[in-house]
């Protein structure tokens, strides 16, 4: 299995300038190669492949000497990135989806480059990059000794730099799979981020909502600087991006801690299989759903569970909030109805609690503690709010 290990880099001013120049060079190559493919099709109805463009790279270096400054494999990876985008474009057409033709990258839309094989090395507290030099790196956690580093991606996040290592790790031993003694059904929501089948809830931190006033303040300051491209406007742009970065980091930190507690507390975690991309099309709920970050939380839970021997299952989300978890009868509700009151069996629960029990009941695994956990009234919180 593959895992990505991300570490903060602390380049000098000269190194940061070099890294920025490399990003500009890769963006130049990406955009020119995209223009070549586009013109070849519009003019001669011919497709240009990655191998054809990679062959022309040596000639391009003669006419554009600044390409020689960048590591050759980094340039080749920029061409592979374009080729991958075209392959995904044709795949979407084949599947009848909204295709989305590959677009040219603006100045702030190309924020990473990759060493696909070699040209990088870790040396204690230093990280050596070919043609750039040794950069200070903060290794806040070790890369497993049995892991093999396959690629290294250098990423810019506003004014911070990161090294992202794609590491190949041995697949978990199937014998390490936990026996399912404790299981939980999880209903994700907006009022409470999570509601468990025993009635326990995890509050939604609403990081974006809490910072909206600060975002608006920074945005207004930017809007007052009318001249686009000016130094003052660019500085304020960075400040706006820094506020959004802090919100992302807060959300990610919360999800990491919460997913870890779920994985440590249960042997089986059951989520409903939501189509989040469809849900965010609702203009009234899109911002709140994005702020909650359900997809990120599920992703973190899934990869942590794979390492810990915990099972994560996704079940159908159809009518989980409409069906009674006790008698199975349909009890229609609007989004505004937050209490489930069944007229058939008399069950009276919060809407999300009822959904969590229904989600767990749809699991295909044999759960010894299902009956006891489903009937629990929620005394005690298995996963405390972070």
Image (spheres, helix red, strand yellow):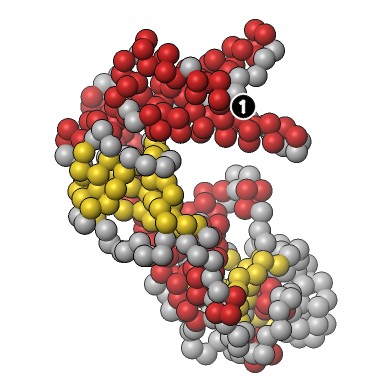
Observer-nearest of 363 and 37: 37
Q: Would you say 174 lies left or right of 19 here?
A: right
Say above or below: 49 vs 265.
above
Residue 345 at x, y percent in the picture:
80, 85
The residue shown at (67%, 8%) is 44
Q: Is residue 301 visible?
A: no
Residue 184 at x, y percent in the picture:
60, 79
Observer-nearest of 297 and 12: 12
Say above or below: 285 vs 75.
below
Residue for badge 1: 101
Say above or below: 123 vs 341.
above
Q: Would you say 70 lies left or right of 260 here?
A: left
Pointer 1 local density, CA inside 10 Å: few below 14, some 14–19, many at least 20: few
Residue 172 at x, y percent in the picture:
53, 70
The residue shown at (75%, 34%) is 94
The residue shown at (28%, 37%) is 130
Observer-nearest of 42 and 118: 118
Q: Would you say 199 lies left or right of 12 here?
A: right
The residue shown at (49%, 28%) is 79
């Amino acid at each position: 299995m593959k895992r990505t290990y991300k570490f903060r880099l602390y380049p000098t001013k000269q190194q940061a300038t070099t890294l920025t120049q490399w990003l500009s060079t890769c963006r130049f190559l990406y955009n020119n190669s995209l223009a070549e493919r586009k013109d070849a099709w519009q003019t001669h109805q011919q497709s240009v492949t990655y191998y054809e463009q990679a062959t022309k790279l040596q000639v391009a270096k003669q006419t554009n000497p600044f390409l020689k400054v960048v590591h050759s494999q980094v340039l080749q990876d920029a061409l592979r990135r374009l080729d991958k985008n075209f392959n995904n474009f044709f795949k979407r057409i084949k599947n009848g989806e909204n295709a989305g033709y590959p677009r040219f990258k603006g100045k702030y839309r190309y924020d990473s480059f990759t060493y696909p094989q070699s040209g990088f090395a870790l040396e204690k507290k230093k990280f050596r990059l070919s043609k750039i030099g040794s950069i200070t790196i903060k290794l806040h956690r070790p890369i497993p000794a049995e892991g093999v580093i396959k690629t290294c991606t250098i990423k810019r996040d506003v004014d911070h730099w990161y090294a992202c290592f794609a590491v190949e790790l041995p697949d978990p031993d199937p014998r390490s799979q936990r026996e399912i003694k404790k299981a939980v059904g999880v209903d994700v929501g907006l009022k409470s981020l999570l509601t468990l089948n025993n009635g326990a809830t995890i509050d939604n931190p609403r990081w974006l909502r809490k910072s909206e006033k600060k975002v608006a303040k920074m945005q207004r300051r930017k809007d007052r600087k009318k001249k686009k491209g000016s130094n003052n406007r660019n500085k304020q742009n960075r400040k706006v991006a820094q506020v959004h970065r802090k919100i992302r980091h807060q959300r990610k930190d919360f999800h990491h801690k919460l997913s870890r507690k779920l994985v440590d507390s249960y042997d089986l975690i059951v989520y409903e299989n939501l189509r989040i991309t469809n849900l965010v099309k609702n203009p009234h709920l899109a911002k709140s759903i994005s702020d909650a970050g359900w997809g990120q939380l599920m992703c973190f839970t899934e990869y942590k569970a794979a390492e810990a021997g915990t099972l994560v299952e996704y079940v159908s989300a159809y009518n989980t909030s409409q069906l009674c978890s006790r008698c199975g009868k349909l009890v229609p509700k609007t989004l505004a109805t937050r209490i489930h009151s069944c007229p058939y069996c008399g069950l009276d629960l919060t809407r999300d609690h009822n959904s969590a029990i229904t989600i767990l009941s749809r699991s295909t695994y044999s759960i010894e503690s299902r009956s006891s956990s489903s009937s629990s009234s929620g005394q005690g919180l298995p996963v405390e709010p972070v």
